[in-house]
Amino acid sequence: MDIGRFPKLPVRIRWQADHQAPCSAFPSCWQDIGRGQTGSDDSPRFYKKWKLDWMDRGCCWMDEYISCLGARGFEMSRPLLMSFIAKSVCVGVHVCVCVLLCLEVKRAGSIPTFTRLRAGRKGLEPIDGNVSGAWPWRMRSRRAAACAAAAVIVSRRLKVRSQKCTARKILLEFQEACYTPLARLRQVVDAMAVEMHAGLVSEGGSKLKMLPTYIDRLPDGHERGLYYAVDLGGTNFRVLRVQLGGLEGRVIKQEYEEVAIPPELMLGTSEQLFDFIAKELVSFVAREGQDFRLHAGQNREIGFTFSFPVKQTAVNSGTLLQWTKGFKVNDAVGEDVVAALQRGIERRGYKMRIAALVNDTVGTLAGGRYWNNDVMIGVILGTGTNACYVERAEAVSKWAGDIPKSGEMVINMEWGNFWSSHLPRTYVDESLDNESLNPGEYGFEKMISGMYLGDCVRRVLVRMAQEACIFGTPVPHKLLEAFSLMTPDMSKMHHDDSSDLKVVAEVLKRVYGIQNTTVGIRKIVVAVCDTVCQRGARLAAAGIVGILKKIGRDGSAANGVIKRNTFEQSDMNGFHDEVPVHYTSGGRTVVAMDGGLYEHYTKFRNYMQEAVVELLGEGSKNVVIELSKDGSGIGAALLAASHAEYVIS
Ligand code: ADP
Ligand code: MG
């Protein structure tokens, strides 16, 4: 073959093979083989018929490619190479050809024609004359084998690299969509304050329900006696007893037990669920030690922490508005949950009184206030998320009842349902919401809380697995299962600081059976965890600052000087609080926080605290977020004490 004059490749035969690139143009030498036998048949069967084995194909490719390389250099030859074979194999073949030819050249003329080629910047360049296409059989087999090996190795490398590239692209896109710079957080803060106001003005005025809790007295340390709490959260159910000793004795002793809620009860009937709760409570009471004593004439009084949206009708009654956090006990919606539990207890032959129905957020606020008068806000960051705060009763325009003596009312915000166009929503949130038990509801909760963070990460990984095959093919079956990645596992991966990310590898293997991930892929998994965690934590921070802004405690009224709500200046809707809630000591505001997510997910906690400082600047010195561990349980017992029938003086 004359390499000085590269013939335009006659593309006479186009072959659409099942497993090949969509269209391959065959080199002329192949056509020579074919022409002699069949004429101009261009069907796939043509090649099957003549059984061209892969070795021949490899040699043909190489012959043709070498000719082209010699004549035109690599840049010009690449299209030819790519027309033979899949893109990922091209570089393998090219590398192999170059190596082989260099070796052959070194051998000094075992094939003399090669001595006239040299490796130039653009590939192999002819020195002079012609290169013969006739290769001895021995060389053909060696060439073909080497070609195949190099092609496999290089194509694998390329495949991994291209998987990583695609995965990185998906990651970048997701990070961009989740981005929460300060300006955006400020918009969320303002939107939160606006929505809070709207929710207080009228029923249905906002997606924030802003439910008055009928709690106008918070525990202050004077409470005495034995009280109980029942805490139905999201994942677990707790029963608790506490012996209170007034200001001097405070909490003399407390005990609690925790039971996982059987998943079938979360989707069963109201009677089954409340029967289960009553059974656990009764058996807890039956195992009471001598240290816990009721006063003569005192009844057993319970604070019932029920962490789902309830429309309260009194301090100890309320109807369930809807289920969240994976519960769907349909016949309980619209029912008085206190009456339902009371019936369950009576069915077991016990006499107890439910003195207060409280949300876990309200319990946390009460638990915090018992120790510290500066506690004004209660926040839950656990399976679900919610917040409550102490509001001026007069600011609750929709409140039809009497203004309480204290002039204050605890408002259960149900902030999980907060919505604003400023929230950074992505395809992950769309799909998670569509497949959830309460589509269209609790969008904020689905971006923030422990129940959903792991699943947000999983959804991004699914996309990477499907589009970039980062976990091989087919996509691991379990990865496609909703909620298969729990937030504690996400947190473990996120906190992995080993150089080879072995915790990430362990979690992927244990949860999904995924093995042999590269460190590069593990890094991408950690970055996804970080993105989801950071977004959730920063939005939670913006929510807290929104409440501080609403009650005029966002730090702009430092040192206890009462000032109008700073929202006055930025409010587009023209509202403001006339008088912020009073300061108790030096303008300090404490947020009582409870929930496994905040407690155990260190990076989440850190991101959240950083964002609060970013948003409040100097004012952040007056705001303290305090973990009030299991505050919701003891807080409910404390509220039972402060709303008890029998008051011990
Ligand atoms: P609940 O909200 O059901 O009352 P908790 O307040 O104990 O219960 O919170 C439990 C939730 O906290 C879990 O569903 C999980 O999402 C989250 N969580 C628990 N441990 C961790 C952890 N180590 N890392 C991250 N999240 C955690
Ligand atoms: Mg809880």
Image (cartoon, rainbow, N blue to C red):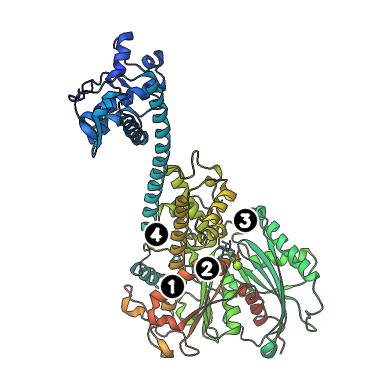
Gap between marks 2 and 3, in whole Å? 34 Å
Gap between marks 4 and 1, in whole Å? 17 Å
Gap between marks 1 and 3, in whole Å? 39 Å
Which SS class for mark 3? loop
Above or below 542: residue 157: above
Q: Is mark 4 within 8 Å of ligand 1?
A: no
Badge count? 4
Nearer to me, 347 or 537:
537
Q: Residues within 10 Å of mark 2 (few under 14, many from 20)?
A: some
Instruction: Give the amino acid at mark 1.
Output: Glu
Marks 2, 4: nearer the viewer: 2
Q: Upstream in the sequence, badge 4 or badge 1? A: 4
Which SS class for mark 1? helix
Which SS class for mark 2? helix
Dots 2 and 4: beta carbons under 8 Å? no
Question: Residue 141, image x and y in percent?
Answer: 41, 23
Above or below 487: residue 47: above
Residue denoted by label 2: 602
Q: Upstream in the sequence, badge 2 or badge 4? A: 4
Q: Upstream in the sequence, badge 2 or badge 3? A: 3
Marks 2, 3: nearer the viewer: 2
User: Does the image show residue 196?
Assistant: no
Instruction: Give the amino acid at mark 2.
Output: Thr
Residue denoted by label 1: 610
Residue denoted by label 4: 178
Gap between marks 2 and 4, in whole Å? 20 Å
Q: Upstream in the sequence, badge 2 or badge 1? A: 2
Which SS class for mark 4? helix
Gap between marks 2 and 1, in whole Å? 12 Å
